[in-house]
Image (tube, coloured by chain):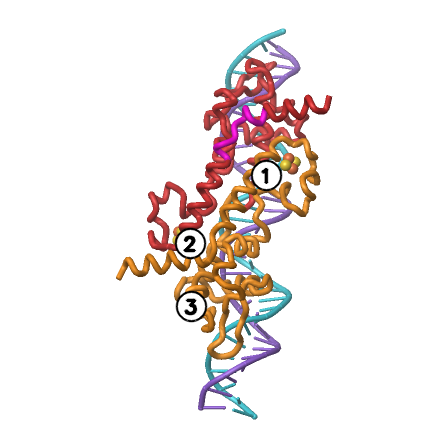
Chain colours: A orange, B red, C cyan, D purple
Amino acid sequence: MKLSTKSTYGLRAMLAIAMKDKNTATSINDISGAEGISVAYLEQLLNRLRRHGLVESVRGPKGGYILSRRPSEITVADIVKTLEGNIYPVHCVSPKNGPLSACSRGASCVPKIVWHKLARAISDCLESITLEDLCAEAIRIKRRKS
Amino acid sequence: MKLSTKSTYGLRAMLAIAMKDKNTATSINDISGAEGISVAYLEQLLNRLRRHGLVESVRGPKGGYILSRRPSEITVADIVKTLEGNIYPVHCVSPKNGPLSACSRGASCVPKIVWHKLARAISDCLESITLEDLCAEAIRIKRRKS
DNA sequence: ATAATAGTTGACAAAAATAGTCAGGTATGA
DNA sequence: TCATACCTGACTATTTTTGTCAACTATTAT
Ligand code: FES
Ligand code: FES
């Protein structure tokens, strides 16, 4: 029931990108320095986020990554789904397995009720938080310090 | 973000025990037959559940396991916590790490807000479902079939 | 042009967690 | 006293996680 570092690092990276002006790209090197995450690992993560359409890359000097949508249109669920592969606590309740019935014990599996509720709770929670929300919070904290 | 088989098997085992009369013990062999889970693995899981006080064991012939509390007093959260070790999606928000501040990036870590909300959502969901609820559902399904 | 910057890609590898297995032991009731 | 069934700890194979690395491509400033 643990989230991997991919998600926690990925969210931190996305927040770092979101905190900058919309038309200035943030390089992996900058993120690595600010967040203390290795360059090589960040490459892997941001590449994946790009292939899933969450960020766009700008190559060459002064290049880096920018969000491909507005911060208010990117949820934490988007990021976690991209980096973990999916968001489901047990494979049984993944939509790939059909609406309700594809897993080994069929539709009458009682525990499945639990896993469905849990999947919904997790999904609702992560979809309710956008990068915009987190940016706002980050600015609030920064202001409080000064 | 996956639950291990420990939890899914464990919940099925607990439900099997709960479905029987309060004073007839359910043996590992019975559960193994009914649920298709290996005896050796079930031993490991039920032992753990016993050490955490969720079930009691009855040794000797006609022995097995019984719930140590009423089904209405055992939540899915109890079972998952016992078998996974804890219920927190990232180690940062575990109570072991102090109220809010023990993880590496301190109290001002913005993503922490997300993980706290998520931990709460998961906890609320799993604590809201008891074995009694699942027994009731199992009986309802059984009745519908006949 | 070309050098410096920065993203792109795929393969590789160590370490940890998961999902079990197994052997030998102990308690209890018929 | 024997069959049943729990108890315990150690062990192992597999998979996932957490990265690293090398070689390549695109862009811009000079
Ligand atoms: S077997 Fe898939 S949820 Fe029960
Ligand atoms: S470092 Fe612990 S939540 Fe951010």
Residue B119 location, x and y as percent? 45, 43
Q: Which residues are magenta?
A: B126-135
Left or right position of A40 against A96: left
Residue labelled with disc 3: A20
Bin the neighbour count of mark 2 within 10 Å (Cα to Cα): few under 14, some 14-19, many 20 and up. Answer: some
Magenta region's main secondary structure? helix
Residue B129 falls within the magenta-colored stretch: yes
Q: Is residue B48 found inside the magenta-colored segment of the image?
A: no
Same subunit, tags 2 and 1: no
Discs 3 and 1 carry the same chain letter: yes
| Cα separation between marks 2 and 1 | 26 Å
Q: Residue A73: image x %, image y %? A: 51, 59
Is the distance from the Cβ of mark 2 to the nearest ligand 2 atom less than 8 Å? yes
Instruction: Judge from the rendering whether residue B121 lies leftward or rightward of residue B143; answer left or right.
Output: left
- Between the C-alphas of marks 3 and 1, the distance is 38 Å
Badge 1: few (under 14), some or many (20 or more) residues near its Cα, within 10 Å? some
Q: Relative to A50, does residue B68 appear above or below in the rendering?
A: above
Label 3, label 2: how far apart the Cα atoms are: 17 Å
- The residue to which callout 2 is attached is B111
